[in-house]
């Protein structure tokens, strides 16, 4: 067990990356069980991180805009004043590595990450070709943490009775980043899948962001029986829905990481826009289907992956 009395973990996002950092969070907490542990993150993850029980403090101002001088000065002041003995940069981006420079002119804390000059660099030249889970485990091993448990989301719970869920249902996540359309299976195919699931006794339930309303509308138009919960769920709701669902099918998005993490039987659809070898969802019952272009993936193949 390490002796640093104050420890910082940096993880800014996004959702899938945050879910895959939960094992490392637990490992750091165990290793520094007597330390005050602070997470530097962003607003969307504050409540979720708090509920995990891994952290004593959560700072949600971890991503000031480039022109936000006040924000950068505030971040520098808080970092330097906190007296951190060690920092685990699990974001390992150019931005988070720059935070190491905010401690200038020193003293600098022990630092696990990829910042130039840090005390515990993850210097494996193949780190960018490793899956996130293995990469973070190796990074922590370099810093003296040899055991990283799998993702545990048992603490993420919510009452979802107000959604009036069908008795047997499958979750569909047909959305995704608007600026990466290649990651999306066409809405009309999700509509056909929704109809096929309904015919097999599994009511389709749509999840996603409010901004994806156009995609959800297209799926619901093709399958009017679908229940549209887009824009109505938070992270705790998704975890609860995943535990009750018979299955989840979706594009390579953050919610699919969360659903897979709670043990929901998951089928995740990939194109060449992302690589499951680097960022694929992990869980006890995950199937990955990949096509390029993704539109060539047939509904029958998805049903086959579900055993239907």
Image (cartoon, rainbow, N blue to C red):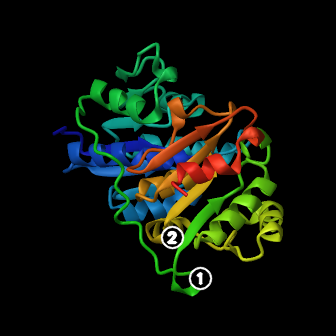
- Percent across and percent down for residue 216 are 77, 65
| Residue 249, visible in the rendered structure | yes
Residue 42 seen in the figure = no
Query: Looking at the image, which residue is at 41% across and 29% down?
Result: 135
Q: Position of residue 65 (x, y in %)?
A: 70, 44
Residue 241: give its label: 2
Q: Position of residue 256 (x, y in %)?
A: 55, 53
Q: Identify the residue at horizontal 33%, vertical 58% (top origin).
A: 56
Quadrant containing the C terminus in the rendered view: bottom right
- In 3D space, how far apart are the residues under numbered discs 2 and 1 (Cα atoms)? 10 Å
Q: Is residue 178 left or right of residue 301?
A: right
Which type of secondary structure does the marked residue at label 2 adopt?
Answer: helix
The residue lying toward the viewer, choosing from 221 and 64, is 221
**Residue that appears at 50% across and 37% down:** 91
Q: Secondary structure at mark 1?
A: helix
**Does 290 appear above or below 287?**
above
| Outermost residue toward the left in this view | 1
Q: Earlier in the sequence, mark 2 or mark 1?
A: 1
**Residue holding disc 1:** 163
Answer whether labels 2 and 1 touch (C-beta < 8 Å): yes
At which x and y percent is residue 33?
20, 50
Label 1: few (<14), some (14–19) or many (≥20) C-alpha neighbours in 10 Å: some
Relative to 297, say whether 156 is above or below: below
Quarter of the view holding residue 83:
top left
Count numbered badges in the picture: 2
In this rendered view, identify the residue nearer to me: 269 or 34.
269
């Amino acid at each position: 067990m390490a002796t640093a009395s104050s420890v910082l973990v940096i993880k800014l996002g996004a959702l899938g990356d945050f879910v895959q950092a939960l094992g490392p969070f637990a490992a750091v907490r165990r290793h520094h069980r007597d330390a005050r542990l602070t997470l530097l993150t962003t607003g969307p993850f504050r409540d979720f991180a708090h509920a995990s029980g891994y952290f004593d403090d959560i700072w949600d101002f971890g991503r000031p805009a480039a022109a936000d001088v006040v924000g950068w000065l505030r971040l520098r002041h808080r970092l330097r004043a906190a007296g951190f003995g060690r920092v685990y940069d699990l974001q390992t981006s150019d931005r988070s590595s720059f935070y190491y420079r905010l401690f200038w002119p020193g003293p600098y804390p022990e630092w696990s990450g990829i910042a130039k000059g840090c005390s515990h660099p993850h210097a494996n030249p193949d780190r960018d070709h490793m899956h996130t889970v293995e990469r973070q485990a190796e990074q922590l091993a370099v810093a003296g943490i040899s055991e990283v448990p799998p993702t545990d989301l048992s603490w993420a719970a919510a009452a979802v009775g107000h959604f009036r869920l069908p008795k047997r249902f499958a979750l569909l996540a047909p959305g995704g980043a608007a600026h990466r359309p290649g990651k999306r299976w066409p809405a009309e195919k999700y509509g056909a899948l929704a109809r096929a699931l309904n015919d097999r006794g599994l009511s389709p339930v749509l999840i996603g962001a409010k901004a994806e309303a156009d995609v959800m509308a297209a799926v619901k138009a093709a399958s009017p029986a679908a229940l549209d919960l887009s824009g109505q769920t938070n992270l705790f709701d998704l975890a609860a829905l995943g535990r009750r669902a018979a299955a989840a099918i979706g594009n390579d998005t953050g919610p699919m990481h969360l659903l897979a993490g709670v043990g929901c039987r998951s089928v995740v659809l990939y194109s060449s826009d992302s690589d499951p070898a680097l960022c694929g969802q992990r869980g006890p019952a995950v199937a990955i289907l990949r096509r390029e272009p993704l539109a060539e993936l047939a509904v029958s193949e998805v049903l086959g992956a579900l055993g239907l």
